[in-house]
Image (spheres, rainbow, N blue to C red):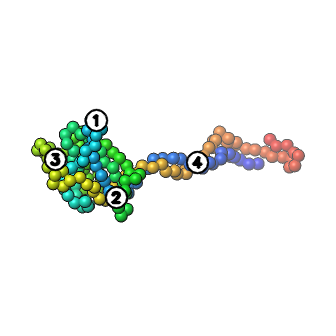
């Protein structure tokens, strides 16, 4: 006699995808252009002449003349500037390229300056590339294993009687 028998279902391991992100700090090189409404590129104005950007720097890196869009390309810096396989981003009109103190590089509204400021900057500092450390947030698909169980509590039996052995009868 077996009393209070409970039968459970099987267990199964499933691989479940989820979206995760991670921060990564890399050494990059940036080049910029200003693009007008006819898609003609013009040099962007550097706001300071140094090629290396200090890690503590926060503010504008490049500006464009009014009515043009800033476009920048960045790639990882490995001993020389090489933009093959770089990532190109186009900002909105009247945006400048900014670097925040935490290392993020982004398009932001230009600070208000006097007329012809960008031409003056070009005459003083020229066009050029910048090398800096940048923090990148990568989003990727990761996987985890989860166990799923199926059980049936309705399989409870108050008692069971087995009789007969081989070839016998079971109730």
Mark earlier in primary sequence (2, 4)? 4
Q: Which residue is mark 3?
A: 119
Question: Around disc 4, counting alpha carbons within 10 Å, would you say few (fewer than 14), some (14 to 19), or many (20 or more)?
Answer: few
The single residue placed furthest to the left in the displayed view is 114
Mark earlier in primary sequence (3, 2)? 2
Q: Which residue is mark 1?
A: 38
Q: CA distance from mark 3 to mark 4?
A: 61 Å
Question: Around disc 3, counting alpha carbons within 10 Å, would you say few (fewer than 14), some (14 to 19), or many (20 or more)?
Answer: some
Secondary element at tag 4: strand
* Residue 94 placement (x, y as % from top left): 22, 40
Question: Around disc 1, counting alpha carbons within 10 Å, would you say few (fewer than 14), some (14 to 19), or many (20 or more)?
Answer: few
Secondary element at tag 2: loop
Secondary element at tag 1: loop
Q: CA distance from mark 4 to mark 1?
A: 54 Å
Q: Which residue is mark 2?
A: 81
Residue shown at the point (85%, 43%) measured from the top left = 169
* Residue 105 visible in the picture: yes
Question: Around disc 2, counting alpha carbons within 10 Å, would you say few (fewer than 14), some (14 to 19), or many (20 or more)?
Answer: some
Secondary element at tag 3: helix
Which residue is more in the foreground, 124 or 19?
A: 124
Residue shown at the point (16%, 52%) measured from the top left = 123
Which residue is more in the foreground, 68 or 91?
A: 68
Which label number is shown at residue 14? Answer: 4
């Amino acid at each position: 006699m077996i009393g209070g028998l409970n039968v459970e279902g099987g267990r199964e391991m499933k691989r479940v995808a989820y979206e995760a992100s991670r921060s990564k700090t890399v050494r990059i090189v940036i080049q910029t252009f200003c693009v007008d409404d006819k898609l003609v590129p013009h040099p962007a104005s550097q706001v300071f002449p140094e090629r290396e950007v200090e890690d503590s720097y926060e503010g504008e890196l490049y500006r464009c003349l009014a009515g043009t869009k800033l476009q920048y390309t960045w790639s990882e810096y490995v001993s020389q500037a090489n933009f093959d396989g770089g990532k190109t981003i186009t900002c909105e009109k009247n945006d400048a390229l900014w670097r925040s103190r935490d290392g993020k590089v982004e398009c932001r509204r230009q600070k208000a300056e006097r007329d012809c400021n960008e031409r003056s900057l070009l005459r003083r500092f020229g066009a050029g590339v910048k090398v800096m450390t940048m923090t990148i947030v990568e989003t990727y698909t990761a996987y985890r294993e989860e166990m799923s169980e199926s059980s049936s509590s309705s399989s409870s039996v108050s008692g069971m009687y087995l009789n007969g052995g081989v070839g016998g009868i079971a109730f």
